[in-house]
């Protein structure tokens, strides 16, 4: 079974590419969705979060704003949160891979925003990085402002600067899929990759 690592910078179009893999019949592990499940009411992560960050969990519900206020700009607090979340996500990822192997899947996708940062790219057969024109990405990020308000260009750029550079991702990638051109172009790139994997190249 070929393990495809999928990553990309903020607003690069990674979710769109992941959806294209799903539509092609390739199972996808969504790390962000896994985190949301772990932190949802009754989620496995809630007891540990409640113990580590008093006041952030009330009535079995995570107060995301309260948690964000505690960890943003606080490296020690963020590290404590990561020590809670990362082992649980790794466990879910391992379970996903076992299930794919049991089903004899020819390929699967690990959709992980920090794929390279956590070193998981080393465990993938193919690393796919999703990119989009900077103008497109800035526009997408600005539309994510709170309460319907558009984020400033300066704030959007600041968010991108916190991430690994596009140059470094490209350097470590096997394949770069570009979005922001047309949906058809992205579809063709995904299908070309799957064809190459099927041919064993």
Image: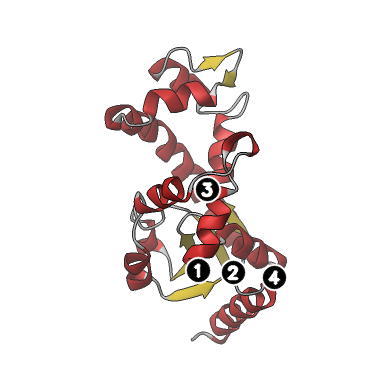
* Front residue of this view, candidates 110 and 13: 13
For residue 180, what is the image quadrant? bottom right
Specify which label sits upstream in the sequence, 4 or 3.
4
Q: Which SS class for mark 4?
A: loop
* Distance in Å between CA atoms under marks 1 and 4: 25 Å
**Where's residue 158, x and y in %?**
38, 48
Specify which label sits upstream in the sequence, 1 or 4.
4
For residue 79, what is the image quadrant? top left
Q: Which mark is residue 180?
A: 2
- Does the residue at mark 4 contact the one at mark 3 (Cβ under 8 Å)? no
What residue would you read off at disc 4?
A: 24
Disc 1 crowd rating (10 Å Cα; few below 14, some 14-19, many 20+) is: few
Q: Which SS class for mark 2?
A: loop
For residue 24, what is the image quadrant? bottom right
- Does the residue at mark 2 contact the one at mark 1 (Cβ under 8 Å)? yes
Disc 4 crowd rating (10 Å Cα; few below 14, some 14-19, many 20+) is: few
Specify which label sits upstream in the sequence, 2 or 1.
1
* Distance in Å between CA atoms under marks 4 and 3: 20 Å
Q: Which mark is residue 28?
A: none
Specify which label sits upstream in the sequence, 1 or 3.
3
**Where's residue 12, x and y in %?**
52, 61
The furthest residue to the left: 76
Specify which label sits upstream in the sequence, 2 or 3.
3
* Distance in Å between CA atoms under marks 1 and 3: 24 Å
* Distance in Å between CA atoms under marks 2 and 1: 7 Å
**Where's residue 28, x and y in %?**
60, 58
* Front residue of this view, candidates 180 and 51: 180
Mark closer to the observer (1, 3): 1
Residue at horizontal 38 percent and vertical 56 percent from the top:
120
What residue would you read off at disc 1?
A: 133
């Amino acid at each position: 079974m070929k393990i495809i690592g999928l990553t990309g910078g903020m607003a690069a179009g990674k979710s769109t590419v992941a959806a294209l893999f799903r539509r092609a019949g390739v199972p996808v592990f969504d790390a962000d969705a896994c985190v949301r499940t772990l932190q949802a009411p009754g989620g496995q992560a809630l007891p540990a979060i409640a113990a580590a960050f008093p006041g952030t969990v009330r009535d079995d519900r995570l107060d995301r704003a309260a948690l964000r206020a505690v960890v943003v700009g606080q490296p020690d607090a963020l590290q404590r949160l990561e020590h809670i979340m990362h082992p649980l996500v790794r466990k879910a990822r391992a379970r996903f891979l076992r299930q794919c192997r049991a089903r004899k899947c020819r390929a699967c996708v690990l959709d992980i925003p920090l794929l390279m940062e956590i070193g998981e790219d080393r465990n993938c057969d193919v690393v796919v990085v999703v990119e989009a024109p900077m103008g497109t990405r800035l526009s997408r990020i600005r539309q994510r402002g709170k309460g319907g308000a558009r984020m400033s260009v300066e704030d959007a750029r600041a968010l991108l600067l916190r991430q690994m550079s596009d140059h470094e991702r490209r350097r470590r990638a096997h394949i770069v899929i570009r979005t922001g051109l047309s949906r058809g172009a992205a579809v063709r790139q995904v299908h070309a990759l799957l064809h190459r994997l099927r041919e064993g190249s």
